[in-house]
Image (spheres, rainbow, N blue to C red):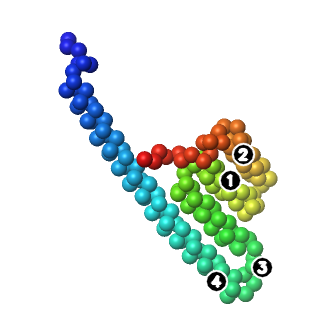
Amino acid sequence: MPNHTHDPKLKERIQKQEKRDHRVEHIFRRILHTIERLIAAVTLLVLLFSLGLEVYKILTTANYLANSSTYLHNVLTIVVGLEFVRMLIDTTPASILEVLTVAITRHVILSHDDPWSNVACVTCIAGLFAIRRFLIRRTELKEEMVEQE
């Protein structure tokens, strides 16, 4: 059985294939990044429209702020959406943990479930802080999770 490890033609073909694979992977990454940014831009436009609509309701609807539950629900939904947009643009562990923290906090503020649900949410938030503090190095908190070239 011949040994192909020293065949220069085979090595050259393997190197060319690796370069092609690397280029294709790079193209896919750029396409996915572009799609993520497009989704972030559309989401941001919708959130800005929602915020404008909320301000319009405050100014035009009598006693709109009297029902604070509706106001809080709408505004906190916009805040979670803004954090989500930030996560799409800046995919670091810190931004992902912040989105989860804000979403869970929103649930605690808005839901009036049983006390055990609130305990579970608070435990989740404490777990997220523990993950941030003990499992993720400070240098990794600011590093992009997706390689960029």
Sequence order check, earlier mark of 1 and 2 = 1
Corner quadrant of residue 2: top left
Label 2 sits on a secondary structure element that is helix
Task: Tell me the residue at 72%/45% (across/down).
Answer: 129
Looking at the image, how many numbered discs can be counted on the residues? Answer: 4
Pinpoint residue 143: horizontal percent, then vertical percent: 57, 46
Residue that carries the numbered disc 3 in the rendered image: 66
Q: Measured from the top left, where is residue 77 in percent x and y?
A: 64, 66
Q: If the image is split into quadrants, where does the N terminus sit?
A: top left
- Mark 3 neighbour density, 10 Å: few (under 14) some (14–19) many (20 or more): few
Sequence-first tag of 3 and 1:
3
Q: Amino acid at mark 2?
A: Phe
Q: Could you say whether the residue bearing mark 3 is in a helix, strand or loop?
A: helix
- Earlier sequence position, callout 1 versus callout 4: 4
Kind of residue at badge 3: Ala
1 and 2 marks in contact (CB < 8 Å): yes
Relative height, residue 50 to residue 99 (above, below): below
What's the distance in space between the residues labelled 1 and 4, CA to CA?
29 Å
| Residue 135 placement: quadrant | top right
Observer-nearest residue: 111 or 94?
94
* Mark 4 touches mark 3? (CB < 8 Å): no
The alpha-carbon separation of the residues under discs 4 and 2 comes to 37 Å
Residue tagged 2: 129
Residue named by callout 4 = 56
Instruction: Give me the residue at 69% from left, 82% from top.
Output: 58
N-term-proximal mark, 4 vs 3: 4
